[in-house]
Image (cartoon, helix red, strand yellow):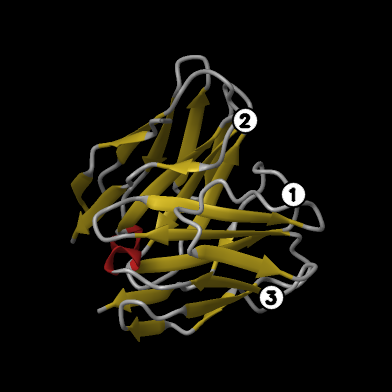
């Protein structure tokens, strides 16, 4: 069974602070790694799809890095804002189907 | 433009009944996915349609579950003889191209409750 783990499970951050969290996945048969943001009562929204070892992607205050050899990706949020409060999901695509992690629930305290 | 839509948004059904969930993908998107999220669990892949090729059904949990898609249009997920463990949010997503290296665009989901 493929294991995609995200840590921490939940995180409370003060508005304005920067934060990061981790997605760990198998280091073999890597094909792609996805990051999504899922706000309560909304649909999951794609943030990044990363395919190459060493990839770094950025969208506004959010960025992500990828290390396929050691099997992890970091998501960074700079200067957290209340609208960043959401669950952040990663999904690993290897030889089999896309497997999602359980998510990191981020709460920004004003 | 219009995003992915799903209907109904909520469905309550009695155990043993059949249900049909509908997904309208973004126009022109060739790939379509079904997922579910049961309470307290992560997103679980169910099935993947890739144009006219045979769908990837590897995630369907039992033979009570089936899905259809005609061409690159609407898809329906059917659950026969529903059980309480089928209660979940069922999400549909579409993607402009085949393969899993492209962003998926999710619908709002159908919340299914089996009583």
At 62% across and 74% down in the image, what residue appears? Answer: B3
Q: Residues within 10 Å of mark 3 (few under 14, many from 20)?
A: some
Residue in the foreground of this view, choosing between B105 and B52: B52
Structural crowding at the residue carrying mark 1, measured as other residues with C-alpha within 10 Å and reported as few (<14), some (14–19) or many (≥20): some
User: Would you say B21 lies left or right of A81 here?
Assistant: right
The residue located at (33%, 84%) in the rendering is B12
The Cα–Cα distance between marks 2 and 1, rounded to whole angstroms, is 13 Å
Q: Which quarter shows the N terminus of chain B?
A: bottom right
Residue B114: x %, y % from top left: 30, 76
Name the front one of labels 3 and 2: 3
Which one is in front, A20 or A32? A32
Q: Is residue B52 left or right of residue B35?
A: right
Confirm or deny contact between disc 3 and disc 1 (CB under 8 A): no
Q: Position of residue B11 (x, y in %)?
A: 38, 83
**Foreground of the two, A22 or A96:** A96
Say above or below: A68 vs A91. above
Do the residues at discs 2 and 1 belong to one chain?
no
In the depicted structure, whether residue A7 falls above or below residue A106: above
Instruction: Say which of marks 3 and 1 sits in front.
Output: 3
Q: Position of residue A108 (x, y in %)?
A: 23, 56
In the image, what residue occupies the spot 48% across and 66% down?
Answer: B91
Whole-Å distance between the Cαs marked 3 and 2?
28 Å
* Residue corresponding to mark 1: B98
Q: Secondary structure at mark 1?
A: loop
Q: Which of the pair A60/A28 is nearer the observer?
A: A28
Q: Chain of mark 3?
A: B
Which quadrant of the rendered structure holds the C terminus of chain B? bottom left
Inter-mark Cα distance, 3 to 1: 17 Å
Residue located beneath label 3 in the image? B74
Respond whether the residues carrying marks 3 and 2 are from the same subunit. Answer: no
Residue tagged 2:
A31
């Amino acid at each position: 069974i493929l294991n995609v783990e995200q840590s921490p499970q939940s995180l409370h951050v003060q508005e304005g602070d920067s934060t990061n969290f981790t997605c760990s996945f198998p280091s073999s048969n890597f094909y792609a790694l996805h990051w999504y943001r899922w706000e309560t009562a909304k649909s999951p929204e794609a943030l990044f799809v990363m395919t190459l070892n060493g990839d770094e992607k950025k969208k506004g205050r959010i960025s992500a890095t990828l290390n396929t050899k050691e099997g992890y990706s970091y998501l960074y949020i700079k200067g957290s804002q209340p609208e960043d409060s959401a669950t952040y999901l990663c999904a690993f695509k290897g030889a089999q189907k896309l497997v999602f992690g359980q998510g990191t629930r981020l709460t920004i305290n004003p | 433009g219009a995003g992915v839509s799903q209907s109904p948004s909520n469905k309550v059904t009695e155990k043993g009944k059949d249900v049909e969930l509908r997904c309208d993908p973004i126009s022109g998107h060739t790939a379509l996915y079904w997922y579910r999220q049961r309470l307290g669990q992560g997103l679980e892949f169910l099935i993947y349609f890739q144009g006219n090729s045979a769908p990837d059904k590897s995630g369907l949990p039992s033979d009570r579950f089936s899905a259809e898609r005609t061409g690159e249009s609407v898809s329906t997920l059917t659950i026969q003889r529903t059980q309480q463990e089928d209660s979940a949010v069922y999400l549909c997503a579409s993607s402009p191209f085949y393969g899993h290296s492209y962003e998926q665009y999710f619908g709002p989901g159908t919340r299914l409750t089996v009583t």
